[in-house]
């Protein structure tokens, strides 16, 4: 028994998580559910929604995709005009139901739910300190540290308690909080992870939406207003929207995750003020200027390599073809045949079109090389399909170190570019030439 995605996706970066919050709309839970559908690419391990009917918080969450976790009956039970939701890919804590978000807690000021995209690099230190002080943790995720810090705060207002808690954490966070009578959104001072604000109107109702990406706003008919600024906190209550900037000290450098544009975000989203599809095409055009090659056709490694390959093809006036076809219906597990099938692991997800590739000098465009094992299998599969030459082009610079801010990257020893030159990587993946986009 082979565990998918052990063959291919282990050699990819993993999305972090997706968060959404809806305030002031009678179909808040349903709109949150639909938004999580749009953000499914950011996490497939679990999904959850917490709503407020003004008196109590109602939660449903479970392991699996949004469609597996929710149905119409469950959504109807999540009554109220405000809700927050979460899709999870774990960067801390195991894939267990207790680690699914939103996390819910009760303390002296009422109930509070939280959903988090990011990673706190001092979570273990804070957790040990809190446990020494008597805190009892119910999950294994770093997000719960924030709940305990809020509960321990002696500040008087909801925003001040959140500010007091967040001033103690270090790392990446785009957060949504929900209590019985208000919702809060917060983004870390560096702006590592995306978070956007929108408005939704319809049937005489109007409300606010915050989401990891604009594609969620598009699906539910919300109007994009702006990014939540790095270090900004938004309070939604009966008085409307209030904004706070408690962490503005002039010393915080904005440091946005470039892989949102390279790989993570949906192409139809606007992230960090730029359309992702257009950014990826621009990467491809620049890559073609830096690393042209005498070839006959450009093909992408689908799906995230498609826009960059289009940009490369446009810049070089070479034809663009879908020389690799992706199977979009691969489940989480598959049973491998006992007899050996060449390139089986990668063929489960990708298949090369021999009619397009046979006898051709081919440019293959992908967004990254992590360990190199998948690239090696893809190159060999394309060569088996009859390609005469294979020129691998990567639309991002070499990845030479892991990330600690909410991306599941391998250790430095597992990153091939950390210890090998471009020429050594080329030989390993068996391409005729290899070039990366420059920094």
Image (cartoon, helix red, strand yellow):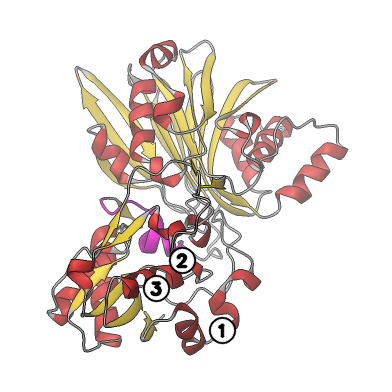
Q: Position of residue 342 (x, y in %)?
A: 43, 64
| SS at mark 2 in the image | helix
Q: Which residue is mark 3?
A: 380
Image quadrant holding the C terminus, namely bottom left
Could you tell me how far apart the alpha carbons at marks 2 and 1 are, in whole angstroms?
Answer: 16 Å
In this view, the residue in front, 112 or 355, is: 355
Q: Which residue is mark 1?
A: 420
Image quadrant holding the N terminus, namely top right
Dot 3 or dot 2, earlier in sequence: 2
Q: Residue at x 50, y 72 (%)?
A: 372
Magenta residues, start to end: 257-268
- Residue lying farthest right? 132
Is 199 drawn above or below residue 77 in the view shown? below
| SS at mark 3 in the image | helix
Q: Nearer the viewer, mark 3 or mark 2?
A: 3
Residue 259 among those drawn in magenta = yes
Say if mark 1 contacts mark 3, CB within 8 Å. Answer: no
Number of numbered labels in the structure image: 3
Q: Nearer the viewer, mark 1 or mark 3?
A: 3
């Amino acid at each position: 028994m082979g565990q998918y995605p052990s063959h291919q996706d282990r050699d990819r970066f993993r999305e972090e998580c997706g968060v959404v919050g809806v305030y002031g709309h009678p179909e808040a839970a349903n709109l949150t559910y639909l938004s999580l559908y749009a953000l499914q690419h950011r996490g497939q391990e679990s999904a959850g929604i917490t709503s407020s009917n003004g008196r109590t918080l109602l939660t449903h969450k479970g392991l699996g995709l949004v469609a597996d976790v929710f149905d119409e009956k469950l959504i109807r039970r999540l009554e109220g005009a405000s809700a927050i939701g979460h899709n999870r890919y774990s960067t801390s804590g195991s894939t267990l139901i207790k680690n699914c978000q939103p996390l819910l807690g009760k303390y002296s000021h009422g109930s509070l739910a939280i959903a988090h995209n990011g990673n706190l690099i001092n979570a273990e230190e804070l957790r040990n300190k809190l446990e020494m002080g008597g805190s009892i943790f119910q999950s294994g995720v770093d997000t719960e540290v924030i709940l305990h810090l809020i509960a321990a705060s002696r500040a008087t207002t909801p925003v001040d308690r959140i500010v007091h808690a967040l001033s103690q954490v270090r790392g990446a966070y785009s957060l949504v909080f929900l209590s019985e009578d208000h919702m809060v959104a917060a983004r870390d001072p560096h702006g590592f992870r995306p978070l956007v604000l929108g408005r939704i109107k319809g049937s005489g109702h109007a409300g606010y939406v915050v989401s990891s990406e604009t594609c969620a706003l598009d699906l539910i008919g919300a109007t994009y207003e702006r990014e939540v600024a790095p270090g900004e906190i938004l309070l939604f209550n009966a008085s409307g929207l209030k904004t706070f900037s408690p962490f503005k000290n002039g010393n915080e450098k904005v440091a946005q995750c470039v892989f949102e544009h390279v790989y993570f975000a949906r192409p139809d989203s606007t992230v960090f003020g730029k359309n992702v599809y257009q950014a990826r095409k621009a990467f491809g055009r620049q890559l073609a200027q830096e690393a042209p090659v005498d070839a006959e056709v450009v093909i992408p490694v689908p799906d995230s390599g498609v826009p960059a390959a289009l940009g490369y093809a446009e810049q070089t006036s070479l034809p663009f073809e879908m020389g690799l076809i992706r199977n979009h219906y691969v489940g989480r597990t598959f049973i491998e045949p006992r007899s050996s099938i060449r390139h089986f692991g990668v063929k489960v997800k990708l298949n090369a079109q021999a009619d397009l590739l046979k006898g051709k000098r081919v440019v293959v465009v992908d967004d990254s090389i992590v360990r190199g094992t998948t690239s090696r299998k893809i190159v060999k599969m394309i060569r088996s399909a009859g390609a005469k030459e294979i020129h691998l082009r990567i639309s991002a610079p070499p990845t030479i170190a892991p990330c600690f801010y909410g991306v599941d990257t391998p250790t430095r020893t597992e990153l091939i570019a950390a210890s090998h030159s471009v020429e050594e990587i080329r030989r390993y993946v068996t391409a005729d030439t290899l070039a990366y986009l420059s920094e």
